[in-house]
Image (cartoon, rainbow, N blue to C red):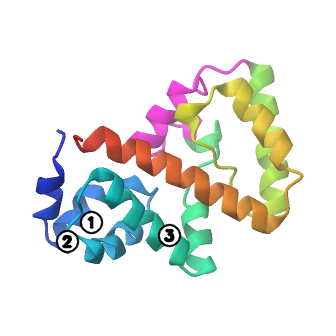
Amino acid sequence: MSLSIADINAMDQAAFTARLGFLFELSPWVVARAHAAGPFESREALHAAMIAVLEAAPEADRLALIRAHPELAGKAAIAKALTAESLSEQAGAGLDRLTPEEYARFHALNGAYGARFAFPFIICARLNDKASILAAMQRRLSNDQLVEINEATAQIGLISRLRLFDLITS
């Protein structure tokens, strides 16, 4: 069910958080903190308020959000133990239809990435396919920690924007 920005603006913080909390993977705190910036003129303004919350958050909170994301094509995905949104987004990128060789490559890169950064690789799967995701994983392994935290945060921004725009009519 899609909502209008007027519907969103009419919600108290609890309803707002309950309805929009899924936008940031298992981290409704981002949405809850953004509520105070309302009323919102548009879905773009709402998203900007949520990104401002994320960017102002302490590094520990940002890292907790990053770590709340599942590995791409990881064990949770295979077991279908992801949020509905993550499951759909990974499937849309073809990550539910990997060959054994592709799965092995994802597994190896997920392991190397996790060992290097201590959080999962994050990319907006809806804007990529399995080949571009694998290439980005390989390329981003050479980043330093701060660059990768910032890149993961930017990708989370893209993910949340697409989720929000699916929900709210313009």
Q: Position of residue 166 (x, y in %)?
A: 32, 38
On residue 54, the disc is 3
- Nearest-to-viewer mark from 3 and 1: 3
Of labels 3 and 1, earlier in sequence is 1
Q: Amino acid at mark 2?
A: Ala
Magenta range is 77-99
Disc 2 element: helix
- Nearest-to-viewer mark from 3 and 2: 3
Q: Quadrant of residue 61?
A: bottom right
Give the vertical position of 24 relative to 167 (above or below). below
Q: Which residue is mark 2?
A: 14
Q: Position of residue 48 (x, y in %)?
A: 41, 61
Between the residue at mark 3 and the residue at mark 2, the CA separation in whole angstroms equals 19 Å
Q: CB under 8 Å between callouts 1 and 2?
A: yes
Give the vertical position of 134 relative to 159 (above or below). above
Q: CB under 8 Å between callouts 3 and 2?
A: no
Give the vertical position of 3 relative to 104 (above or below). below
| Left or right of 19 in this view: 44 | right
Label 3 Cα crowd, 10 Å radius (few <14 / some 14-19 / many 20+): many
89 magenta-colored: yes
Label 2 Cα crowd, 10 Å radius (few <14 / some 14-19 / many 20+): few
Q: Position of residue 99 (x, y in %)?
A: 72, 18
| Left or right of 137 in this view: 20 | left
Of labels 3 and 2, earlier in sequence is 2
Between the residue at mark 3 and the residue at mark 1, the CA separation in whole angstroms equals 15 Å
Q: Amino acid at mark 3?
A: Leu
Quick one: 76 or 143, which is closer to the camera? 143
> Farthest residue toward the right?
142
Q: Which residue is mark 1?
A: 17
Label 1 Cα crowd, 10 Å radius (few <14 / some 14-19 / many 20+): many
Q: Position of residue 67 (x, y in %)?
A: 61, 62
Which residue shows up at 49% across the image and 34% down it? 89
